[in-house]
Image: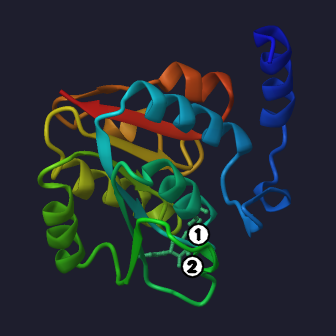
Amino acid sequence: MDTKIANQLLTKLSNIRSPHELYYGGIRLQQSWTTLFVLERIFDENKDITAIVELGTGHGALTAFFGLHMKNRGRVLTWDVDDSQIEWTKLEGLPCQFIKADILDQRAQKWTCEFIANDRSLIFCDAGERDIRSKQFHIYAAILKPHDVIMIHDYKNSIQDSDVKDIKDLQPFYQEMFDDYRTFILSRIKV
Ligand SMILES: C[S@@+](CC[C@H](N)C(=O)[O-])C[C@H]1O[C@@H](n2cnc3c(N)ncnc32)[C@H](O)[C@@H]1O
């Protein structure tokens, strides 16, 4: 598709603020559509990312998206305290694993550490409400290895730059693109 037309289309899509109108693979998506566009580009340009951890599965549309991108390439681990909404399992053959647990539980942190130990990894923080957003980012940023990536939704609403500015050795990662498309994702890489 012509780049100019694609950019116009994406700007229109990024104006859709109600994520409940969006579906991915028939599953309700709790992200903006443009988040998927930026992630797709990141996976294309960073082929060595082979382990993804999602904190907060919800319905699992993003889990399915991650799974499709990691197929024949890597693995996905997704956590949620509640398994009652999960729908991603209706798609077969994805390299995804779900664990029902509180992501603030130390065992979840330990298992995540083991899961990402030997791969360049991306941790996507999307569990719970405003009160645990900053906390989960701090906890999981602490287990990253150099070149690993951490992202968090709902940037500028539930978490601000000031909440993460004191974390050592983290730099913006494709942040301009996420911002341009108003994805409400904060994205950092461990250096
Ligand atoms: C916004 S939804 C996740 C959406 C999903 N990542 C997506 O993009 O489609 C947030 C989820 O976090 C889960 N959650 C809340 N607190 C949690 C905790 N302490 N540990 C694990 N999951 C939690 C909720 O059950 C809910 O399903």
* Residue 4 against residue 10 in the figure, above or below: above
Where residue 136 sits, quadrant-wise, is bottom left
Q: Residue at x 68, y 32 (%)?
A: 182
Foreground residue among 13 and 139: 13
The earlier-in-sequence mark between 2 and 1 is 1
Q: Secondary structure at mark 2?
A: helix
Q: Residue at x 77, y 67 (%)?
A: 26
Identify the amino acid type marked 2: Thr
Question: Is the C-beta of the residue carrying label 1 under 8 Å from the nearest atom of ligand 1?
Answer: yes
Looking at the rendered structure, which numbered label has been put on residue 98? none
Q: Residue furthest bottom?
A: 84
Q: Report the side of 49 relative to 84 (left or right).
A: left
- Separation of residues labelled 2 and 1 (CA atoms): 8 Å
Foreground residue among 69 and 56: 69
What scheme was used to colour the molecule? rainbow
- Residue 92 picture location, percent across and down: 57, 74
Identify the amino acid type marked 1: Gly
Foreground residue among 142 and 4: 4
Mark 1 sits on what residue? Answer: 60
Question: Is the C-beta of the residue carrying label 2 under 8 Å from the nearest atom of ligand 1?
Answer: no
Q: Residue at x 85, y 58 (%)?
A: 21
Q: Secondary structure at mark 1?
A: loop
Q: Residues within 10 Å of mark 1 (few under 14, many from 20)?
A: many
Looking at the rendered structure, which numbered label has been put on residue 89? 2
**Can see residue 165?**
no
- Residue 119 picture location, percent across and down: 19, 47
Q: Quadrant of the C terminus?
A: top left
Q: Quadrant of the N terminus?
A: top right
Asked if the residue at tag 1 contacts the one at tag 2, i.e. Cβ–Cβ closer than 8 Å, the answer is yes
**Can see residue 42?**
yes
